[in-house]
Every structure is written in structure tokens, then in C-alpha cells.
Image (cartoon, rainbow, N blue to C red):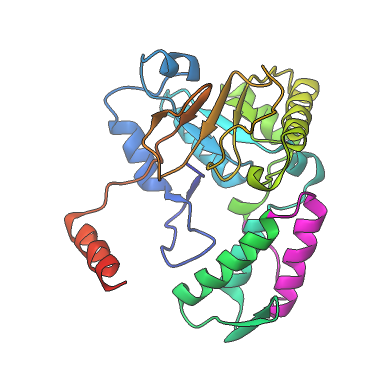
């Protein structure tokens, strides 16, 4: 999961990956078996709860899990903790919600912004370009250019999307939340060499050890869809976690494991609507 929010709006880009906090608490309270540690889950002794990214929506979910007595692992990108810079996709989603423009020019092509589907198409194009950039300052620079084109002046993120601080992580550790490595930055592995990916993993792991005393041996791939590349330093991680909805949950070869994405089961009516929309396309 990617965190919780208070009554997230389904049509909002900022809330797109957040679970309703009330639903989540009810789920934790009624779950027949507690979530267990990663190690216990890997030997089939239960399910593990993992949360990706280092923002307050993620911390709130982790705190709720601990309050109900569940084990929980939070995968963070230490760069954003250390630097205080927001995640680029948080800014992108905020801009799409706040823009009043009807069209926008990107890569010499004009995109409509009328409706969520049109905005999603534009977002996909921007994301594809940002993911090819290997330096975080380049990603943020491009997103700020996009926000300028969208005419978004107020760029203050809501609390739930702001990055966690070093003290926040210390508090979570004291509550029993396990902190693990999501890479130094939220990079896209598919655009980087094995050495560049290895550097991201090593930097993230070094920060966790130096600042929190955590010796991280597991890694959750940003965006959740990239397998370990050929040429990655052997033994760099003990477990590589995906979150790819296109693959079944479970082992995905070698040290790779695909996670199931947590969320409420769709109602029969919503499943019928989704099937009808797919048929229309």
C-alpha cells in the first residue's frame, strides 16, 4: 500500500493511491490474523504488510498498524528525508488537481486537460519522460516546468504528501515500525544501468545504517514493476520486492517476490461497470 487519507476523493490525482483511513482501521481491527514480519511471511507463517514511500500518509498507515498490534514494514527513500524535497509525482498529481488550464503543450504536442481520462493520458506522457531522467534534481526541475505550464501557483503539498523527517523515522522505529530500503531516490530502474541501480541501493542502505542503525538487506523496487537487472552486484540484497498487478503474487524468480496490492474488494456493481468500460474501449 501507499498510505491512508481521511476520506480520499476517488477522482483526485493526489489521493489516487491512498486508502480510506477509516476503512483501513476497520480492516486491521477485523482481520482474523495479525500481519507478521517479512521473515515469517517468507516461510509461510502469515502475511506481511508493506508500505512504500516516505510521506505522512505512509507513516499514518504504519502507526495505525502498530496500534492494532500488526507488524509493518515501511520502505523509504532517504534522499527525501535528508533533503526535504517532495516526491516529483506528488507535485505532478497536485498540479493536475489544481490546474485550470484546458490544454497544455508538452514535447511539442498539445494535450487536452478536459476530464480525468485526458489528464491521465497527459500524466502518462510526463511520467514516461521523467522516468528516463537518472538524477533527482533533473526530475524535480522538469516537474516545476510542467507546473509552470499548468499555471499552478500554489505548490504547497497537503500534509499527507509531504516527506517524512529524520525525527519522524526515529519515532516510527520506536513504535516498532520496520524501516527498509526503497532506493536513495524514487528512481525508475528500467532507465538505469545495473551499476546505477546498485549505487541507489547502496546509498539508501548506508543512510539507514548511519542514521537509524538499520542494516537493510531487502529492497522494494520503486514503481514496483522492475526485476533485478543482469549485472547487479551479487548478494547486494537478500530479497527484491515488486508490486506489479500484472503478475500473480508470490515468487517471481531468484530473490524476487511480487506483492499483492492491498485495497477493498470491488462490489459486484463496480466490477460490472469496469467490465462494461473495458468492452467500450
Give the x, y percent position of residue 210: 81, 22
Q: Residue furthest bottom?
A: 102
Give the x, y percent position of residue 90: 63, 57
Residue 280 falls left or right of residue 249:
left
Picture quadrant where residue 270 is located: bottom left
Residue 125 inside the magenta-drawn segment: no
Residue 98 falls left or right of residue 256:
right
Give the x, y percent position of residue 1: 47, 41
- The segment highlighted magenta reads 132-158
Q: What residue is at 68 percent from the left and 48 percent from the top?
A: 191
Relative vertical location of residue 90 with respect to residue 254 in this rendering, above or below: below
Q: What residue is at 71 percent from the left and 72 percent from the top?
A: 147
Picture quadrant where residue 273 is located: bottom left
Relative vertical location of residue 255 with respect to residue 259 in this rendering, above or below: above
Q: What residue is at 57 percent from the left and 87 percent from the top?
A: 102
Residue 156 inside the magenta-drawn segment: yes
Give the x, y percent position of residue 201: 72, 30
Residue 125 falls left or right of residue 202:
left
Q: How many marks?
A: 0
Task: Identify which residue, 98 or 101, lies in the foreground.
Answer: 101
Picture quadrant where residue 178 is located: top right
* Residue 101 visible in the displayed image: no
* Residue 51 visible in the displayed image: yes
Amino acid at each position: 500500500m501507499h498510505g491512508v487519507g481521511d476520506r480520499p476523493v476517488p477522482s483526485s490525482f493526489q489521493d489516487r493511491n491512498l486508502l480510506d483511513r477509516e476503512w483501513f482501521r476497520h480492516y486491521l481491527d477485523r482481520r482474523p490474523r495479525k500481519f507478521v514480519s517479512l521473515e515469517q511471511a517468507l516461510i509461510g507463517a502469515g502475511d506481511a504488510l508493506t508500505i512504500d514511500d516516505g510521506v505522512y500518509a505512509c507513516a499514518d498507515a504504519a502507526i495505525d498498524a502498530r496500534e492494532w498490534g500488526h507488524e509493518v514494514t515501511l520502505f523509504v527513500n532517504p534522499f527525501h528525508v535528508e533533503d526535504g524535497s517532495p516526491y516529483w509525482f506528488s507535485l505532478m498529481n497536485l498540479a493536475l488537481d489544481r490546474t485550470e488550464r484546458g490544454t497544455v503543450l508538452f514535447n511539442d504536442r498539445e494535450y487536452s486537460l478536459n476530464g480525468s481520462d485526458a489528464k491521465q493520458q497527459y500524466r502518462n506522457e510526463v511520467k514516461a519522460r521523467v522516468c528516463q531522467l537518472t538524477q533527482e534534481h533533473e526530475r524535480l526541475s522538469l516537474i516545476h516546468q510542467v507546473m509552470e505550464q499548468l499555471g499552478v501557483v500554489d505548490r504547497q503539498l497537503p500534509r499527507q504528501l509531504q516527506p517524512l523527517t529524520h525525527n519522524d523515522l526515529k519515532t516510527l522505529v520506536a513504535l516498532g515500525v520496520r524501516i527498509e530500503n526503497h532506493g536513495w531516490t524514487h528512481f525508475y530502474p528500467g532507465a538505469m544501468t545495473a551499476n546505477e541501480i546498485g549505487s541507489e541501493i547502496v546509498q539508501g542502505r548506508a543512510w539507514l545504517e548511519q542514521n537509524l542503525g538499520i542494516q537493510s538487506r531487502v529492497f522494494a523496487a520503486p514503481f514496483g514493476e522492475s526485476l533485478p537487472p543482469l549485472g547487479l552486484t551479487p548478494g547486494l540484497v537478500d530479497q527484491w520486492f515488486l508490486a506489479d498487478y500484472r503478475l500473480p503474487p508470490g515468487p517471481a524468480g531468484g530473490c524476487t517476490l511480487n506483492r499483492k496490492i492491498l485495497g477493498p474488494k470491488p462490489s459486484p456493481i463496480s466490477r460490472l461497470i469496469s467490465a462494461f468500460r473495458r468492452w467500450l474501449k
